[in-house]
Structures are given as C-alpha cells and as structure tokens.
Amino acid sequence: MVVMNLIKFNDKDKRVLLQGKEFYYGILIEAPTAIVESKILSTFLNNVNKPFVLDPSTYYFHPELNTNEDRPSLVQLREKYGLSEEEFVLYPEDFTEEFAKNFTKNVLNFQANHFASAQKGTLLKYITRDQILKPAWYIPPYFPIENFNDPWVEVNIKLMEYATDFFDNIFPIIGILEKDTLLDFDEKLLRDFIKRIPSKMLGLWIAEFDKKSISEEYLRGYYQLVEEIKQYKKGIILMYANFFDIMPQPYGIAHGICGGDLKYVGSGGGKEYVKMYIPFLRREFTLEKATAILARYGDSFGYSATKEMLDTIRTLNHLDKKYSTLKEKGKTPKGFRISQLSEKEKEEYKEIEDKIRHLKDTIKMEFLKERNHELRELDVTSEINNIKRTIEAVYKRETSTRVAKYYVGHLERWIAAIQEDNNLV
C-alpha cells in the first residue's frame, strides 16, 4: 500500500519543497498562512506544480479554539467568510439553513479563488486557463466535536452536504476536540456519522494529541477508530499527523517537515533546537540527542546517512558558536543590529547565515527522503516486526533502562496498542 504524503507549507521550507518535490505527493496550506503569504504561495505553487489543498481552518471560530480574535490573518479570514465581528465565535444554533449555505459558499469560494486572485496582474497575461491555481480537493467548513453525539456533528454533516452542491471533489475533515472520545467512542453513532459523509475520502484530526507521549490506552483507541472508519471504504487522510500515524495504514498523511528554527543563546534569545528525524526510531530528536543516537546506533541499524548527518550536526554546532559571538557583538537595547558589526564581521555574519540555512535544508531534505521511503508499499506486519527488533536491540545495548525507554518508549506503546487488535499480530 502506498500512503499519500501531503506536506504542510511553511515559508522557511519552500527551498527544500522545491528541490525535493519527488519525495511527496502534494501541499497542505492552512488558511491563515494563505492570507499572510498569498503572493509567496502563488509563486511557489506555480513553480512546484504539485496538487494542493487549502484547509479553511474554520475551527478557529469554534468556542473552544477561538483564542486570538485580534490576529490580523483571522480577522481577514472572518471577513472573507462573510462573518461579522459578533460572529467571531460560532455555535451550533447559529447554523440556520440560510446561514449555513452562505457560510459554506463563502468558505469554498475562498479556496477556489484565493490564489487565482493573487495571480492577477502582469502574471495573468502569461498563464493559460489550465495554469490558474485551483485546489485538488475542496474542504467543507468543519468544527471539532467532543463525541459523536455532539450537536456539532449535525452541523458538520449539513455543511458537507451543502458543499456537494458546489463541488464533487470534496474532502471533509472530522476534527475531534476531546481525546477521551478515543477511549469509548460509540460505534453505532460513529457508523451513522460516517455513512452520511458524502465523500470517499475524509480527513481525521485529533486536537492536542501527541503520539510521542500519549498513553497506550489512547493509542489503542486512536488505532481502533481509524480501523473502524476504514471499514466503510473511506480513504482516511490523517491530518497534522505525527510520525507514527503510518501504523494504522491510512490512505494519506498530512504533516509538516521535521526541523525547527535555530534561535541562538545570548543576544539571539532563547534556544529552540533544530530537530532531526531518526528513521529507525520513527521519531524526531533534538540535534544533541540525535548526535548520541546516530553515533551509537546509526551504522548498526543500517542507516545510510549516518556519517552525512553527523558531519552536518558537527558543522552546525561549530557555526552556532561563531554566530552567537557575532550576535552578542551586535547586541543593542532594542535587540540585534547588524550595523553594530564591522564590515568584515558583516560579511562573516551573512556567510554563516547562508551556511546554516544550507545545513538546515540538508536535514529537512533527509527527512523528506526518509518519509517517502517509509510510505512506499507500507506493510504494517513487517513494520511491527522491524520495530520489535529495534526495541529489543536498544534494551540489549543500553545499560540504563531509563535511557532505553526514552529512545523506544513511544514504539513500545504503539506495539502494545496495536497488538490488542486480534487480526494483526
């Protein structure tokens, strides 16, 4: 089974996404990002020439998730969706037939026309009708539910049904707000809900659900929920997913590129580590942890990029120290100012920045390659057996159970959760 891989757009990743476009299927764009970076995205989408989907992010208007009404991109989004200032927070009772139809129309029009509008001007003279940017699928407005008896269920179904009046290629999303739902979801209510979804493909998003640290019990509920939905011949896209979502063998997975931003110690502020995906442990780690893991396990687990990644980390750490020193020299009461540096230091600063950017892109590209490799012809049984062997090898080699648990505890929880299913292992 081949799993479709959608990558969430981030402006800082666009170089890698362009260079590595053979390693993923398409692009996922969140509506606030589309608002803020419409011209950048229009150029990028034309250049990358990949299918894309635009998440309308209507969950921001849900009472439980509405936390920043003054955020400029959300204000613009509210206006584009035809909502008044008083309608920044929506409730199920607001969705009269007229309101629901108009809201659905506005949300779908935004997806259909936003990038086409951004293409207008001189660019439009040079493109054909086939080159006008349109999503591969259209996502109806959606609001997360707490359970399958939630009043929002009926609202979501209504919005999906209205969406089919405008487009055939719709891609509904089920958002689950309360993870306790996974412990005891009502199969009949779920079945009734899924049967009414007017599409062969749907997204599943569970808010605040960190699969690196979540308990075995929740993972089992998550796995069983996915398996239940699959019985109704629905292609499931696991939205904003973690790296272990391949275990339930979905139709697709949508996630960001692994690799955070560097913020330097000293005048540069706090430190946010670049993260590296370690494929044989199916998890991302900070560079500090990744160095120890790769040095100890990379070759023994047959990871071909071990030397390249260790060299990359070593160079990044060296540049980090030099960059931090220059940041300190350019420190002012208002933050870093490059004008505080000498001409030679300015040149060095820019040169180091370019090198760091290239090295970070190297880490991101390796992630794209590894994810693409993992998602090709995925077989869950062989995947489970490989993970079992990994767990066993780490416990044998580590003298500290605590360290071994840190490395493979997430894998142990996944295996335990999946083995509860009678048909798999």
Image (cartoon, rainbow, N blue to C red):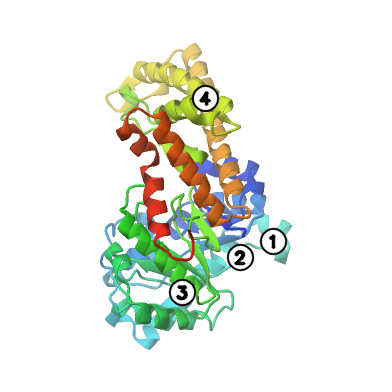
Q: Distance between the residues labelled 4 and 1?
A: 42 Å
* Amino acid at dot 2: Lys
Residue labelled with disc 2: 134
Please state which of residues 13 and 386 is positioned toward the viewer in this rendering.
386
Image position, residue 21 (x, y; %) = 64, 47
**Residue occupying image coordinates x 48% and y 58%:** 425
Q: Distance between the residues labelled 2 and 4?
A: 41 Å
Q: Earlier in the sequence, mark 4 or mark 1?
A: 1
Position of 206 with respect to 69 (left or right) is right
SS for tag 3? helix
Residue density around tag 2, few if under 14, some if 14–19, many if 20 or more, within 10 Å? some
Circles 4 and 3, Cβ within 8 Å, touching? The answer is no
Residue labelled with disc 4: 310
Q: How far apart are marks 3 and 1 (CA)?
A: 23 Å
Decide if residue 148 is in sight here. Answer: yes
Up-down relation of residue 124 to residue 258 (above or below): below
Image position, residue 410 (x, y; %) = 38, 46
**Residue occupying image coordinates x 57% and y 42%:** 370
Q: Distance between the residues labelled 1 and 2?
A: 9 Å
**Residue occupying image coordinates x 34% and y 30%:** 271
Residue labelled with disc 3: 106
SS for tag 1? helix
Q: Earlier in the sequence, mark 2 or mark 3?
A: 3
Position of 167 with respect to 84 (left or right) is right
Image position, residue 32 (x, y; %) = 42, 57
* Amino acid at dot 1: Gln
Circles 4 and 1, Cβ within 8 Å, touching? The answer is no
Please state which of residues 193 and 16 is positioned toward the viewer in this rendering.
193
